[in-house]
Amino acid sequence: MASEQKRIRIAVVGGGIGGLCLALGLLRHPQLDVHVYEAAPQFAEIGAGVAFGINAQTALFKLDPRIRPAYETIRTSNVDASTDAEQKKATYFRIQLGMDHKNGKDKADDQICEIMCVGGFSSVHRARFLDSLVALLPEKVMQDNVSFGHRFVDLKELPDGKVQLEFANGKTAEADAVIGCDGIKSEVRQILLGRDRPESKPRFTHKYAYRGLIPMERARAELGDRQAQNSHHNLGYDGHVLTFPIDKGKTMNVVAFQTMERDWDQSDWVKQVKKEDLVRDFQHWGANVRKIIGMMERCDMWALFEHPPSHTYHKKGQICLLGDAAHASTPHQGSGAGMAIEDAYILSSLLGDIQDTSMLEAVFHAYETVRKARTQLLVSRSHEQSMLYDFQADGIRDDVSKLAEILPRRWDWIWDEDLEVELRDARSILNQKAPNASKPNI
């Protein structure tokens, strides 16, 4: 084991899915001294269900072999998804009309297409998934390597090349490098890119969503087993409604999207509204969508923001961004959390290859080189996806036949990524920046 004096101290700001996955990957390397700083009094996730494609699952299980059995105990799949036996693919989502088409022929609940993928649909409850990751952290790590109640506010470069983190509670900490995993409102991002630069702050997408959890027994009674127990996108004019099972099939997760022409004029991105406002937004939709809306008890409106593309993810081997802090996306391709997990796998692997701080800048450069284009593409493609779902895409609009042709291929570039090739490319870049300085742990 590397001596305490030579260990590379990595400060992870943010203990959400991305930050915890990164920490689990880094803790496997004895030359790295990892410390997680979380603003909340405990690890917690906002939101309910999150879907993971085969790419995200692959990265997750590579990060730490212990994650696979933990994941399998909480994952939820479709109940009756059709399967393409020849390609060994199963249904990820069914996409259907959520309201009657203006052509007078196509009706609500008519299927547009099925999205197929290896393994089919897989979702988890965010909080339970985070709990399963936390359970993998040894008690000593929780005591010595995690600080709660530490809201990061500023960063200073020290004369010896280290950085000093400052927190709202008045405390400070030193590290060789800080990795911002602090989400879409990332303070680390603003420091890295410059607080006055437009690219440092998220932008409103003119979309908002209502979120809800419905007991599966009630959903089955109202909608029938097929609609309630399987994942569906219900498309319509200027909005769409997503449903999928979570909690091992005990709950139906709902996200109902709508379009807003005006800008979001509140500092808080979650707004309490009345049930009649929610019902009014979907009053012209089909019977099943109206039933779903009627079963939703929470009436919170969530504004949807995304990050404009940033020119870099790192600076001087001292600061680096990961997950939503680097490339916050809308949820329309269901891959934001998955990209953060991919980031964590690549970055933790590269950091595990080095033995001293002189290599940090080369590591961050290699990480950015292989990750930036892919992750920023997700932001733009997810934005495009919302336009397709809401019949707003130029040249397509509400053309059901075109949607049926286009949508099934929209996820291939996400799911088909070979992470080992990506990591090999990153290691090659790392060696070019500093020949013979890395020692890949393959």
Image (cartoon, grey):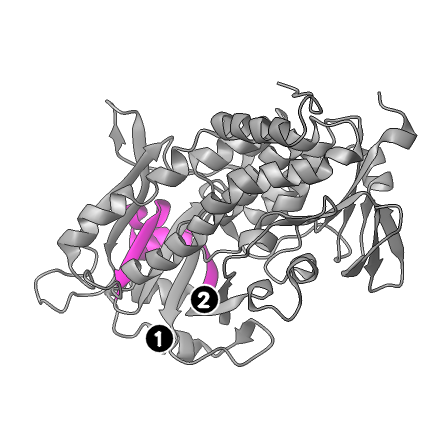
What kind of residue is marked 2? Tyr
How packed is label 2: few (under 14 Cα within 10 Å), some, or many (20 or more)?
A: many
* Residue 124 coordinates in the image, percent (x, y): 51, 43
* Residue 151 coordinates in the image, percent (x, y): 77, 60
Q: Which residue is mark 2?
A: 210
Q: Nearer the viewer, residue 313 or 29?
A: 313
Q: Are marks 2 and 1 in contact (CB under 8 Å)?
A: yes
Q: Quadrant of residue 412?
A: top left
Residue at 77 percent of width and 27 percent of height: 355
Would you place residue 362 above or below residue 225 in this image? above
Residue at 55 percent of width and 71 percent of height: 270
Q: Quadrant of the N terminus?
A: top right
Can see residue 332?
Answer: no
Disc 2 secondary structure class: strand
Disc 1 secondary structure class: helix
Q: Which residue is mark 1?
A: 281
What kind of residue is marked 1? Asp
Q: Is residue 122 left or right of residue 35?
A: left
Bounds of the magenta span?
209-236
Q: Is residue 231 magenta?
A: yes
Q: Is residue 200 magenta?
A: no
Compare marks 2 and 1 and give the one earlier in the sequence: 2
Q: Nearer the viewer, residue 108 or 26?
A: 26
